[in-house]
Image (cartoon, rainbow, N blue to C red):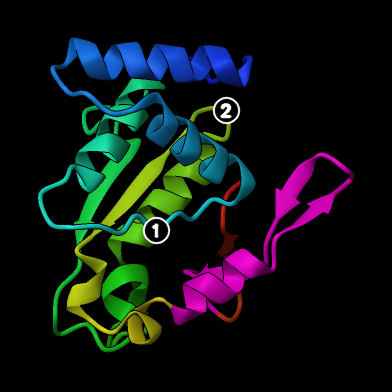
Amino acid sequence: GKYTLVNPGEIVIHINHFHSSKGFLYSEENIKNLYLSLLSKPFVILSGISGTGKTKIVELFAEAVGATYENNRFKLIPVRPDWSDSSDLLGYKDLKNDFIKGPLTEMIIKATKNPDYPHFVVLDEMNLARVEYYLSDFLSIIESRKFEDKKIIKTAPIVNIGTQENPKEYGFPE
């Protein structure tokens, strides 16, 4: 359903029960920290030993608030060791000067067109490639976030999928 803000304590309890119903046990503290981190900044890095459930906690968190693979509001992007720039993530212009969207750009466009619903992207195994190579442009854009008219969060454009005559820019969605 449509995403509406509720009491943070209630949503943490809901998410915790949802995780338990799926057979996963995460501490309420970890769920609360993830929730508060997402509220304060739209980009969260989870670190820890392999196999401890970092990807799963986000996947279940997203599902608990209605963002799933099936409705295209959750996307897992495996980072590849050969990523040396943002083109594999954001996209690139081909020889005909057409923009070929990367998986993150596709999700940014979907989220921009559906602002009333939460969208999640997981960059899995971020450490396989040098983060400063493939994510620096994206991180700079996130830092450009500002309120417009005291209620809408805007960023600088992250991608331009249009042409010189007809630019179509997208920033990081609210």
Q: Secondary structure at mark 2?
A: loop
Could you give the CA–CA distance between mark 1 and mark 2, rounded to whole angstroms? 24 Å
Quick one: quadrant of the N terminus?
top left
**Which label sits in the foreground, 1 or 2?**
1
Q: Earlier in the sequence, mark 1 or mark 2?
A: 1
- In this picture, is 79 found above or below 92? above
- Magenta residue span: 136-163
Dot 2 crowding, Cα within 10 Å, few <14, some 14–19, many 20+: few
Residue 74 placement (x, y as % from top left): 30, 39
Name which residue lies at 32% across and 79% down: 87
Q: Is residue 132 left or right of residue 68?
A: right
- Is residue 12 visible in this depiction of the protein? yes
Mark 2 belongs to which amino acid?
Asp
Asked if residue 12 lies left or right of residue 48, the reply is right
- At 27% from the left and 45% from the top, the residue drawn is 75
**Residue at 88% across / 43% down in the picture?**
150
In the displayed structure, 67 sits above or below 110; it is above
- Give the residue number, with chain letter if any, for mark 1: 45
The answer to if 158 sits in the magenta stretch is yes
SS at circle 1: loop
> Which mark identifies residue 116?
2
The kind of residue on which mark 1 rests is Ile
Give the image location of residue 55, x and y in percent. Answer: 22, 45
Q: Quadrant of the C terminus?
A: top right
Nearer to me, 117 or 50: 50
Q: Is residue 7 above or below residue 133?
A: above
One can see residue 167 in this view = no
Q: Residue at x 70, y 60 (%)?
A: 145
Nearest to the observer: residue 66 or residue 90: 66
Do the numbered discs 1 and 2 sit on residues whose CB atoms are within 8 Å? no
